[in-house]
Image: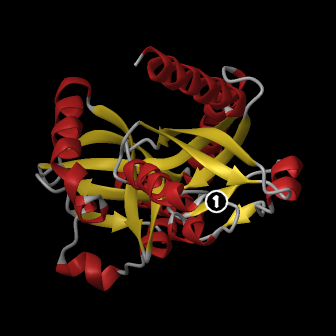
Amino acid sequence: KIKKQLEEKNQELYYISENMNGMMLVTKCDDDFKILYANAGFKNTFDINDIMIKKGIHLIDFMLPYEANKLKEFIHEKLTNHHCVDIQCQMKAKNHLIWVSSKGKYVAEQKDNQQIIIWVCLDVSEEMKRNEETRINEERYRIAVSNTQNIVFDYLIDEHCIVHDNHFIEQEYQIPKRIENIPESLLNLPMLHNDDRTKIQECFNEIEKGQEEAYCEYRLLEKNYHIRWFSMKLVTIFDNQQRPKKAVGILHDISEQKELEQLANKESTLRRTILN
C-alpha cells in the first residue's frame, strides 16, 4: 500500500514538473552536476532530449566557460552550508544566451544512497533587459543633467552608430539623427573640418577599446561657411559583465571661448612684435 502511494506521488510530481511554467531538472551533486532528469521546459529551452541525458550531459555545460569554475565553487559552498542555493547567470540556450534564475535544493536519497540537487529555473532574460535599459537611461539622464546647455547623443557601441534627437544639429549642420558605421563614416561628413577628422576617429576608438572617457575639440562648418568650435566628451556605460555597451556623447559649443583665445594670442603676438 505504501509503495503504491509513493508511486502515485511520483506520478503526480512528474505531471506537475512537465506542465509547470518554467524549468525543472534533477542533477547529481557532483563536480559538474550531471543531469539525471529534465522537464519539457528545460529540454525545449536548451535543445536536449532523453537520449542526450542518458549519454551524459551536465548543467555546467550550459554555463559560460569563464564563469563555470566560479559558479561551481559558489554552488558547492552554498549547498554545503545551507543545503540550498540561488544563482542568476547567463546560459547557452540553443543559438543564443539567456539569463536564468535558478534555485537548487540538496537532497540525500536513502534508497540509492545518492546525493542529488533538485533545480527550479526561470528564464529572466526580458526582466534583465528591462533592468539594463532602465539603468542605462538613468545613467544617461544623470550625465545629461550634470551637463546643462549641451547637446547629448548616444553612441551604440555594438551597432557602431550614433543616435540623437536634436533638430538644430540636424538642420544647421545636416547631421542625420542616426549615423551608421562609426567612426569611419564621420570622415565623410562635409561639415567637419578636414584637420579634425582624425581626432574624432581616435576619440571613438578609445571608447571601443574600453576607456571610461574620451575627449576632443573640433570645428564644424555652418551653412554660411562660418566655423564654429565644439568640444566632445564621451562617457562609457558598461553592462553587467563590465563590457562597454553604450557611450553618452556630450557636445558643447566652445566658439566664444576659442575666439577669446585667438584674440588673446593675437594681442600677445602684437605686443611681442612692438617690444622687439
User: Residue 98: x and y, percent?
Assistant: 47, 60
Residue at 43% across, 76% down: 94
Asked whether residue 157 appears in the rendered view, the answer is no
Q: Which residue position is annotated with label 1?
A: 192
Q: Is residue 183 above or below residue 258?
A: below
145 left or right, relative to 268: right
The answer to which of 54 and 238 lies nearer the viewer is: 238
Asked whether residue 273 appears in the rendered view, the answer is yes
Residue at 71% across, 28% down: 256
The answer to which of 76 and 138 lies nearer the viewer is: 138
Q: How is the image coloured?
A: secondary structure
The answer to which of 155 and 275 lies nearer the viewer is: 275
Which element type, helix, strand or loop, lies under badge 1?
Answer: loop
147 left or right, relative to 73: right
User: Residue 265: x and y, percent?
Assistant: 53, 25
Q: Quadrant of residue 145?
A: top right
User: Residue 121: x and y, percent?
Assistant: 46, 51
Q: Quadrant of residue 46?
A: bottom left
Q: Residues within 10 Å of mark 1 (few under 14, many from 20)?
A: some
User: Residue 239: x and y, percent?
Assistant: 46, 44
The answer to which of 184 and 188 lies nearer the viewer is: 188
* Callout 1 amino acid: Leu
77 left or right, relative to 106: left
* Quadrant (top left/top right/bottom left/bottom right) for the C terminus: top left
Q: What count of labels does the image hold? A: 1
Q: Residue furthest bottom?
A: 51
Residue at 23% across, 44% down: 71
Residue at 42% across, 48% down: 207
* Quadrant (top left/top right/bottom left/bottom right) for the N terminus: bottom left
